[in-house]
Each structure stands twice: as C-alpha cells, then as structure tokens.
C-alpha cells in the first residue's frame, strides 16, 4: 500500500479542510494511507454548447451562453471554481473573502476576489443595487435565502440584466437539515457541467468518494464514540442535528447524539438549553469555527473553554477530546471529505 496525500493537497498538485485543529488528545496528523483507487479509462466530454440547461434545486435552469462574469456566494464556492480551472471568470463574491477557512493552495487567489460587501452573517447577501452593478452573467448562491426573499435580489432582477442564478444545494428551500454527502458531490458536478468541465469535476468527485470508502473500510466496524457537534455564539451553544456536519460525524465513525432532535423545519441547527446539553454527555466535541463568517463568533479554543466551563464533568471536557470544524464544511465546498478523514483519525487513531 502506498501513502496517499490528503485530498486538498492532491488538488493543489494537480493544479486543477476542513482544518481539523486542536485535537487535544493525540490523533495522528500524518496523511491517510489508502489503497490506490482503480484507474478507469478517461472518457473525454464533448465540447459543451450553449444554451445549456442544467438542474438546480430540482428545477431546470437554462444558461444562454458560456459564463464570463461570475459572482459567487463566498470563498467556499470560489474555491470550487479554482479547483476546476475556471476561477478567472469570477468578478466578485457576496461578502468579504473568508481567509480563516480558505484552503492553503487557494488563499492568495481567494484574497484577490472582490467583495460586494454582504454582511458576515447568515443573511449575507449584498444589496440588489450592488449586485447588479457587478454586471454578472452568472450568479452562484449557496446559502439559504441569499436570493428570492423580500430583502434580497430576485431571479427576475438578475434575468433582467441577462444574469442566470444557479443555486447550490445548501441554498435550496429547506435543504440544510437533510443534505447528504452526495449533495456535496452533486454540487461539484453541477458546477463542472455549467462551465463545460465535467471531466475535471468527475475526477474530483471520484477522488473524494475513494477517500470516503477508505475511511469506511477502516472505521466502519469499530465502536462509535458519542459526539456533539456545535458552535458557540454569545456564550451559548447551538448544536448540529442534521445536514453535512452530521454526515461528517457519521462517516468518521462517530455517533452524533443530537441527530434529528429539536431542529426547526428545514434547519440543521438547534438552539438548546444548557440543561439539555448536559443531559446528553458525550466523549468528543466538534467545534465549528465561524470566525471567518459571522461577526461575534469566538475562536475554537475560546469556544472549547466556554463549553468546558459550562460542562466541566462531561467526558469530552475532562479528557480534552475535541476538534475544530471549518466554517465551510456545512455548505457546498471542497472540505467535507478531508473533514471526515481528519475527524476519523481523531476518533479512531488505532485505525490509521
């Protein structure tokens, strides 16, 4: 068996991470050793022609011409375009570049993407006037309610200037709570289809699936430590009970004790009382780092300290068992599979 570099480093080497940090109890940070995936003959995709109709959020969307002026939602979406070799078509993104969670190989490119000044919050869309002034011909939203609400730009507004919105999975109605890892893969394939680089997109997806398969082979039959995945905001904990953060725990061989509990319809996050959190003690904490996305979010170590102060007798606090999850992991991005690999190492070091 040969030693294989993590996905994000292999993406960089091919020119075409979740950074798990602060694992305070000895997971191995060395690259995953995996069997080489089977090599299949490369099938060349015919040259794409426009108008092109794709499916986004379950609906057909027609792109009249090859995109040349693209506005993306945020840094995570920009990195998908960089990996597919079409990042030079980005003219702006909704909000400031998130260099906290930027992938190392794209950080310099991320930093140069113009911001349209959307606020650092869940409702981070720029104003209608500012977005239209960028004169896009394609807009790729990925956050919930970032277009087509009373306070955001509408599809009709975009179409009026010849711009087409292609919404990725996290931005589809009521999607965050039910997203699966397959939806992340489909986002990559969708972007590849839009830009006529389906071969590159398929190679990225095949590589990610091979990584997941290797993790499952290693940890699939091992006991599953109990996990709580959460973030801290204004001194309060909010836990992930569904969506991609829940998928990451599951694929990594953990048992998220909050799966499916107390979430409002369409949401992956549930706000709970301290008493409720204390009533479900866990072995391991996964702390989402939102400092690059939301104003007022606290750094991961500070978040751990808050949680440990509130629940000092919980096994995760006593044994300092915790890791950091990238703020990009819950939305369409390139980091979720690396997140699974690194969390699996933290939960099951004996398997690596």
Image (cartoon, rainbow, N blue to C red):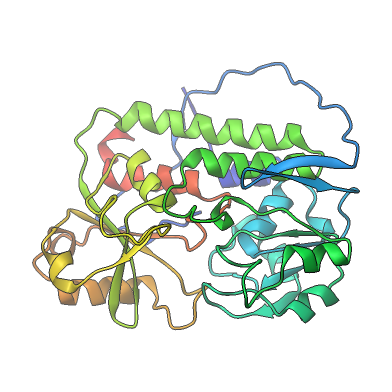
Residue 93 visible, this orientation: yes
* In this view, 244 is above or below 307: above
* In this view, 210 is above or below 307: above
* In this view, 344 is above or below 294: above
Determine the residue positioned at 86% across, 53% down. Answer: 67
Q: Is residue 121 or residue 156 the one in the foreground?
A: 156
Residue 59 sits in which quadrant? top right
Residue 246, x across and y down, in percent: 36, 49
Position of residue 224 in the picture relative to residue 52 (left or right): left
Determine the residue positioned at 40% across, 75% down. Answer: 299
Residue 297, x across and y down, in percent: 42, 78
Determine the residue positioned at 78% across, 55% down. Answer: 87
Position of residue 193 in the picture relative to residue 46 (left or right): left
Looking at the rendered image, the quarter that the C terminus falls into is top left
* In this view, 263 is above or below 299: above
Residue 342, x across and y down, in percent: 40, 47
Q: Is residue 162 or residue 335 the one in the foreground?
A: 162
Determine the residue positioned at 41% across, 44% down. Answer: 340
Q: Is residue 316 or residue 137 the one in the foreground?
A: 137
How many callouts does the rendering have? 0
Residue 177, x across and y down, in percent: 41, 53
Q: Is residue 86 or residue 317 the one in the foreground?
A: 86
Residue 16 visible, this orientation: no
Residue 207 sits in which quadrant? top right
């Amino acid at each position: 068996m040969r030693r294989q570099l993590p996905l994000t480093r292999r993406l960089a080497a091919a020119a075409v991470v979740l950074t798990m940090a602060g694992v305070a109890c000895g997971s191995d940070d060395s690259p995953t050793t995996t069997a080489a995936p089977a090599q299949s003959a490369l099938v060349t995709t015919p040259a794409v022609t426009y108008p092109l109709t794709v499916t986004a959020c379950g609906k057909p969307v027609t792109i009249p011409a090859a995109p040349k002026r693209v506005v993306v939602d945020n840094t995570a979406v920009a990195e998908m375009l960089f990996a597919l070799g079409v990042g030079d078509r980005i003219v702006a993104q909704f909000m400031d570049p998130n260099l906290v969670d930027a992938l190392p190989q794209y950080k310099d490119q991320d930093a140069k993407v113009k911001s349209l000044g959307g606020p650092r919050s869940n409702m981070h869309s720029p104003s209608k006037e500012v977005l239209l002034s960028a004169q896009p011909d394609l807009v790729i939203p990925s956050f919930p309610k970032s277009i087509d609400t009373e306070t955001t730009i509408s599809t009709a507004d975009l179409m009026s200037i010849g711009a087409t919105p292609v919404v990725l999975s996290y931005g589809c109605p009521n999607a965050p709570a039910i997203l699966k890892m397959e939806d992340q893969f489909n986002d990559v394939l969708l972007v590849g289809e839009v830009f006529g680089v389906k071969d590159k997109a398929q190679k990225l997806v095949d590589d990610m699936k091979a990584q997941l398969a290797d993790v499952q082979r290693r940890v699939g039959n091992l006991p599953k430590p109990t996990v709580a995945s959460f973030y801290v905001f204004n001194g309060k904990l909010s836990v992930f009970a569904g969506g991609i953060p829940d998928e990451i725990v599951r694929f990594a061989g953990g048992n998220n004790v909050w799966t499916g509990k107390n979430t409002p319809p369409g949401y992956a996050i549930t706000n709970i009382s301290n008493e409720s959190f204390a009533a479900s003690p866990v072995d391991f904490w996964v702390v989402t780092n939102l400092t690059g996305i939301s104003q007022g979010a606290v750094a991961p170590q500070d978040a751990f300290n808050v949680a440990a102060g509130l629940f000092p007798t919980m096994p995760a606090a006593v044994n300092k068992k915790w890791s950091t999850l990238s703020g990009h992991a819950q939305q369409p991005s390139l980091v979720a599979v690396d997140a699974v690999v690194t969390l699996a190492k933290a939960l099951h070091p004996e398997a690596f």
